[in-house]
Amino acid sequence: MTHSNADKTPYMLDEDSLHEECGVFGILGHEDAAALTALGLHALQHRGQEAAGIVTFNNNRFHSERHMGLVGDHFTDPATLAQLPGDLAIGHVRYSTTGETILRNVQPLFAELEVGGIAIAHNGNFTNGLTLRRQLIAAGAICQSTSDSEVVLHLFARSRHTSSIDRFVDAIRQVEGGYAVLAMTRTKLIAARDPVGIRPLVMGELDGKPIFCSETCALDIIGATFVRDVENGEVIVCELQPDGSITTQSIKPEKPQPERLCMFEYVYFARPDSVVGGRNVYNARKNMGFNLAKESHVNADVVVPVPDGGTPAAIGYAQASGIPFELGIIRNHYVGRTFIEPTQQIRALGVKLKHSANREIIEGKRVILVDDSIVRGTTSVKIVQMIRDAGAAEVHIRVASPMIFYPDFYGIDTPDAEKLLANQYKDMDAMCRYIGADSLAFLSIDGLYRAVGGEPRNNDRPQFTDHYFTGDYPTRLLDQDNESNIHNLSLLASNG
Amino acid sequence: MTHSNADKTPYMLDEDSLHEECGVFGILGHEDAAALTALGLHALQHRGQEAAGIVTFNNNRFHSERHMGLVGDHFTDPATLAQLPGDLAIGHVRYSTTGETILRNVQPLFAELEVGGIAIAHNGNFTNGLTLRRQLIAAGAICQSTSDSEVVLHLFARSRHTSSIDRFVDAIRQVEGGYAVLAMTRTKLIAARDPVGIRPLVMGELDGKPIFCSETCALDIIGATFVRDVENGEVIVCELQPDGSITTQSIKPEKPQPERLCMFEYVYFARPDSVVGGRNVYNARKNMGFNLAKESHVNADVVVPVPDGGTPAAIGYAQASGIPFELGIIRNHYVGRTFIEPTQQIRALGVKLKHSANREIIEGKRVILVDDSIVRGTTSVKIVQMIRDAGAAEVHIRVASPMIFYPDFYGIDTPDAEKLLANQYKDMDAMCRYIGADSLAFLSIDGLYRAVGGEPRNNDRPQFTDHYFTGDYPTRLLDQDNESNIHNLSLLASNG
Amino acid sequence: MTHSNADKTPYMLDEDSLHEECGVFGILGHEDAAALTALGLHALQHRGQEAAGIVTFNNNRFHSERHMGLVGDHFTDPATLAQLPGDLAIGHVRYSTTGETILRNVQPLFAELEVGGIAIAHNGNFTNGLTLRRQLIAAGAICQSTSDSEVVLHLFARSRHTSSIDRFVDAIRQVEGGYAVLAMTRTKLIAARDPVGIRPLVMGELDGKPIFCSETCALDIIGATFVRDVENGEVIVCELQPDGSITTQSIKPEKPQPERLCMFEYVYFARPDSVVGGRNVYNARKNMGFNLAKESHVNADVVVPVPDGGTPAAIGYAQASGIPFELGIIRNHYVGRTFIEPTQQIRALGVKLKHSANREIIEGKRVILVDDSIVRGTTSVKIVQMIRDAGAAEVHIRVASPMIFYPDFYGIDTPDAEKLLANQYKDMDAMCRYIGADSLAFLSIDGLYRAVGGEPRNNDRPQFTDHYFTGDYPTRLLDQDNESNIHNLSLLASNG
Amino acid sequence: MTHSNADKTPYMLDEDSLHEECGVFGILGHEDAAALTALGLHALQHRGQEAAGIVTFNNNRFHSERHMGLVGDHFTDPATLAQLPGDLAIGHVRYSTTGETILRNVQPLFAELEVGGIAIAHNGNFTNGLTLRRQLIAAGAICQSTSDSEVVLHLFARSRHTSSIDRFVDAIRQVEGGYAVLAMTRTKLIAARDPVGIRPLVMGELDGKPIFCSETCALDIIGATFVRDVENGEVIVCELQPDGSITTQSIKPEKPQPERLCMFEYVYFARPDSVVGGRNVYNARKNMGFNLAKESHVNADVVVPVPDGGTPAAIGYAQASGIPFELGIIRNHYVGRTFIEPTQQIRALGVKLKHSANREIIEGKRVILVDDSIVRGTTSVKIVQMIRDAGAAEVHIRVASPMIFYPDFYGIDTPDAEKLLANQYKDMDAMCRYIGADSLAFLSIDGLYRAVGGEPRNNDRPQFTDHYFTGDYPTRLLDQDNESNIHNLSLLASNG
């Protein structure tokens, strides 16, 4: 997504958490390609709930269905799947980052080229997307969407290379940032992961047919086997041969860089049952809670998770501290898609739409609230107030990740730096007073690294990317650096 | 709802659990009546997700909005709320039990009468509903819906009494079964609970204005105060007086019966943070797990809840047994409204759409799976298989309620008796083999009673109704007894 | 329809013409009953464009589809027709008269009774509808719509008679006014026409199966044969016998009254190719124009119809006068359903959305404009201005019907009496000045009678009803006379 | 539109007439630009009923609304117009020619370019559109639609010229065929007409602000003044200057060709009240009927138009022959958008959905049926049968245009040559027998030329293009000539 962070402020007022932008899934050679892709996207729904799309190829024709809403709202209808014949499919779930989601921007995107059609979907963000888009437009390209995927399409279309593989590699080597890209031509399923491997992408197999997807949970739902991670900087091309066999080719960068997976996949984004970079996410989170209890012990009666994100860390915290784990906050799961346009009255009621205190558990107790992360802190203020209203004797906030100081440019929707809690208050005491808690503690960087990888941070060569905590960005930020001389494109406001 | 259980079999194949049919909310004298009702219904959404409706009264006119879908899909739009002016409102969420939900059946229902309009909504089921309907039709009544609420409307309309209160009492005293009814006239908000108090109904207050709702969680969401339970057999009438004050009148049965609340409210239906019959539901469920561990101990490595229903009992089980509580099954919360029309492929994948094994937690472990209840057992078979596929060394099922043998006729959607797991296998061993577990145990009746009320079952005068476990129905079952001589009405199949 | 005329004023500002309220069609014993009914309703679409409904009976069940919009918008979809199996069907097209059309009011209406289900649809208006409704509600009836048809349903349901035929006759003899009613039970198709035959209703036959419909054009579209008019006051019952044969029974009033068909069917409502009361409507209209030319000759260069209503009379006028007939005004037929919510700017442009001057034909010419009728005159003002703007030398208005002084109570939507042009100006000169024409003339009452029936009006026993011109109402007007003591019901404002 | 004619056969089976593909409207400098454009498009609705779109520019942003359906279905809603602020607008109505209309193809199209945004809409067809598209794709362009307008966008984007005017002229000079193009940048409204002026385009003015539109009727509806025709080959650029004034610049081809307007605009497409090429269309059609009567007299009792297309010619025929003009066929105008998916039964009933015989006028009469044109003849067969069924003594067909032998490539949807009636029968007698008429006659080429322009055809330098009658195409047909070596693009089948 190419966007300035400034636009998102109003949205972030409602939703005080970070958002992954997308999930991808692709499969080659399976007769149920579209249905399996729909299921895979359903398992990836937590990575984007605003829109979903699937493209298939069959009988010399590409077929596309793209719809606003959940996967299950449209893609389980047999009539819709019947519009998606073929044994090659890629799909995409999307979280809107700009507030003006329109169907034109829903992926996968498709282009008709002289070498044949190509469809493409990606998760992540190109840090030189605007720069490339500007160059392309100056060279006469016409952009129909505001999606980064379209930039890859144009680079592919304009490549001087002949073969579609060479064109794809040529295109993907020009983009910078964090991304997991899936592409498909008439016979090929192509997967690519960014040079430092910020965004996750795994390879699996079902009935001997290759699958690529954002997380392993999308393999599990269809009973597929995990094969391996796509490596950082790697392009994998699976091709259906005329004899029906499928060949697989791996193209690796000449100068490979060390992998630096995004820490927030472990902290918040990935599903607890997924294995990311070889590590179970639930265990990583439990460890975060465990380490947090060791680092910031406090005497209390109950450990209460802020559901659902804080639950694994709270279990770890309870196990480390011996304080009982209790469901002191009940989450209303029907909020998901609802209350898109809340009234002023409902807005004023704030967080209670999603969370409700379980008074019997809270009343008169010293409560440790465990949350996965704090972004702006507005939600924490409301939750602490709710717990106090329910009669808690003390409220101690324990956050299973470090303080966030810096924006992300690799596909995570972050508020402006000055809106982040950590930048608004000069010290922990001030923060704690703002939130209204009796005490407040964050997990240390090393506590986090140990929870995920077993080792403290190697500051010379960090094992992960943790720029939101440290400011140590794993790539250059071309669009950001050029921001002054990139004029804003006058985007089309369109309903049709 | 008047329906035969036979129709529901196909639906139950997909959904191996019991379903409450409805939730109600009403408020008198508050300027934000409709918005508060929408919020209350949102908190009661777990009691019915298929449709929602609100009726208000303002300026000599009743206003009605009824929509298929979640409360948040329609009733948070300011334009919709603007169609619902007034300071008196009742609302309803509905779970469809017949497969042919149509808007005509969505409550509240309304009728124009000589004494003025009346709107009515209810949770529960009348055990003489069909019998009464047949008598009414024979007397020239025209029924426009298949809802039990309409029966009350007709009885009200045909009552020989003059005052609307007398008419309502006259009508409600003719119906039998389990119900929580809310009604409103131009100036009155009326609440009624069935003679033995099977369905719950509570009274609350906000800014001095009376509220009635199915559960206390609907009070909490809007910051209202709990006043008391509506008693079994009681009719409470709140009336707006010309001077703006509100009077409250309680009409109790001449021969009160002892209360027998539905045990399944504690086992499954009510929200964990609700207080039902004076008892916190989360604690009751934790106690069920606690007692279950005491009754049916087994050596194991992890206690894993079948989410979300089994989670509180699993916490109790873990606390009692000292075996660690772990999230070994991850639930996909986006399933809620999705996959209404799954394809055959997706149907074959069964339970995995909703549940996924967290392999790292399961592999090589002796697993205790804690579930709230088992109805047909088809889900349990799939979950055990899923846990075994994830590499469990042993799988022990512990069910935090007794075996279900009998259908319900008070508003719970149950499969035919012969479809219930408990009726299909001659002993616990056979059941365990069918499910594929290494061991299987259910909570005892007394264990359940103790968990909820602190005392074992008083068999002479049971403290709750538990007919699905024991066959001890708290009322006569007129429609069932007369079934042979009640001809089926040829219902209209209508889309408009 | 039970409504006060006062509500309609705002609507009439946009639409300066009269509106018929409905059309009906029914067929018994034909395997394509629903499709043939859809076609018949399509041919009757000019009688109502707001909503359409069809009920069929098949396999012990009634089936109903009712939709807002044109017949062709919904009822030509094979999926919709598949919801309407059976060989017995009645259908209805509706023109909204109240501005608050809701699906509950769309006909046919259906009721489940002890003697079995009954569906009913009607065209027209009961002059004692409100009075009956009030009596029914006082006796405990619950009304779910504001439609007159529901009154017949209740009278039928409450009748003391045993057979459905006796019940229907009992019910229909209690209502007064102008109506053409179709009803169906499981085996019977019933047609009834009001005692003086104000509204038309004809009987036809296709493949030996009986059909009833508002106009003969609905027979022509499906190639059915005209059998005869249903007589005024007659009830015809066609019944499917167990052996597959169909019997027909005619029930006539004990004291038959002379027929008085509504003159406006000839002037404006009926389709030109229909035969109403044995007379071709196109010829009747041409005769009106012919007689008008004889009565009110003026020298001119062209005769221009106000399309489409004025076209047949303009042809007659041109033939009688020898002045050439020319299309000096072009009508935009796409206006039909469009511009339901025009903007203020578009509203200000008024009549031009529908009509446009054909300047080449008008410029420098003396123009005779022939219109079918003038109601409020607001459209005439705009059309004369448009013709003058196009350069006409003279504009002479000739109206092919008499002046309208009185409201209708038999199913025609008329403005309040004081809004009618004829009541606003004291003489023809004043009217002509208001309209801006050089001359203005209306057809005489006798000219109209001669055009339709060949004879002048028999004032002792008028051959038609012409109350809007003469004030001579053919029935008593009970609701109107009782208006002071009928309190307005507080109707439900409902969107669901 | 780039398409092969072959695809359209199935569609033409239902609709035995030719179809214009589009209408355009644009205005610069008027504060009500969008509302006026909506009205103009409403007046042009006869040129395309499938979709409509409007683009405006305001506050540095382009705004677009494109919707399937009629103009009045969407663009009269104040909420929609509120999405279209600004005083510069272009709009488009579209008739679908391919059967797979998707929103991506609905015009105006928009592109973001380095020189700023540009929107474009056109009526007509490029005879080298496929060839250009192929060249563009080979050069790396990505096409998102199948619309010819997108070709102009790409040529504009890739032009080496600096100014937007030079770029537009550069682009438009590369396309061949028949077209009327409107384009808009941030400050300019640009109009272009093809080199021989096949498609019409006129310039008008309202309150001193320039307007361009397909026909003068779109000026009349908003009270705008006709200024002049855009000349063949001319590009007119109106530009809003910083001081608020508007400049107008005309760019004419270096080697102008003689104009050859499409004869079918006079025969069928244009609205009767439009002035096309300086000639009133209604008068031209009346003259065609007049000349037809002179050329092919036959004794008869009535002249009956096939409505609505044949009406003006029938009036002319009646005036020339002295035989009375009568409405012997009634058209159901509600068919317009309805019956999009007719059932088989309804399909079998064919033409009667739209036309109905007025038996009283036909029975026993010698009938002259006047139609505007005959394409495949399938409709004529049904209409003659319908007239015979109504009892006509004789049926004589008179067609107010010559026989059609050749397909069109300039924006008219024509069936394959071998499907045309004129190519299926070896002589007029065989045709007449096929149609079932007693006699059949077509207007001569010279009769047509005289009716429109007053002079017979100048065979050395024809005054109009008449290629469907004569095979004399006014331009080369590059795509057709290259058809063998243009491979079909594998288009995307998309619903989103």
Image (cartoon, coloured by chain):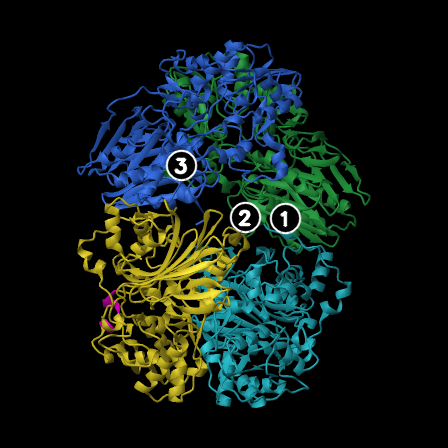
Chain colours: A yellow, B cyan, C green, D blue
> Is there one chain holding both mark 1 and mark 2?
yes
Quadrant position of residue A235? bottom left
Contact between labelled residues 2 and 3, with CB atoms less than 8 Å apart: no
Quadrant position of residue A369? bottom left
Q: Residue at x 52, y 26 (%)?
A: D418
Is C495 drawn above or below residue B121 in the view shown? above
Residue under numbered circle 3: D486
Point out the frontmost of discs 1 and 2: 1
Give the residues in magenta: A416-423
Q: Residue D363: x and y, percent?
A: 66, 19
- The image's mark for residue C102 is 2
- B61 in the magenta segment: no
Quadrant position of residue D221? top left
Q: Residue at x 34, y 27 (%)?
A: D201
> Is there one chain holding both mark 1 and mark 3?
no
Chain letter of the residue carrying label 1: C
* CA–CA distance in space, label 1 to label 3: 47 Å
Mark 3 residue crowding within 10 angstroms, few (<14) / some (14–19) / many (20+): few
- The image's mark for residue C83 is 1
Is C423 drawn above or below residue C61 in the view shown? above
- The image's mark for residue D311 is none
Q: Residue D11: x and y, percent?
A: 52, 35
Quarter that holds the N terminus of chain B: bottom right
- A422 in the magenta segment: yes
Determine whether, in the image, residue C19 is placed left or right of residue A192.
Answer: right
Task: Name the residue type under label 3.
Answer: Ile
Secondary structure under tag 2 reads: loop
* CA–CA distance in space, label 3 to label 2: 55 Å
Q: Residue C135: x and y, percent?
A: 65, 50
First reached walking from the N terminus: tag 1 or tag 2: 1
Chain letter of the residue carrying label 3: D
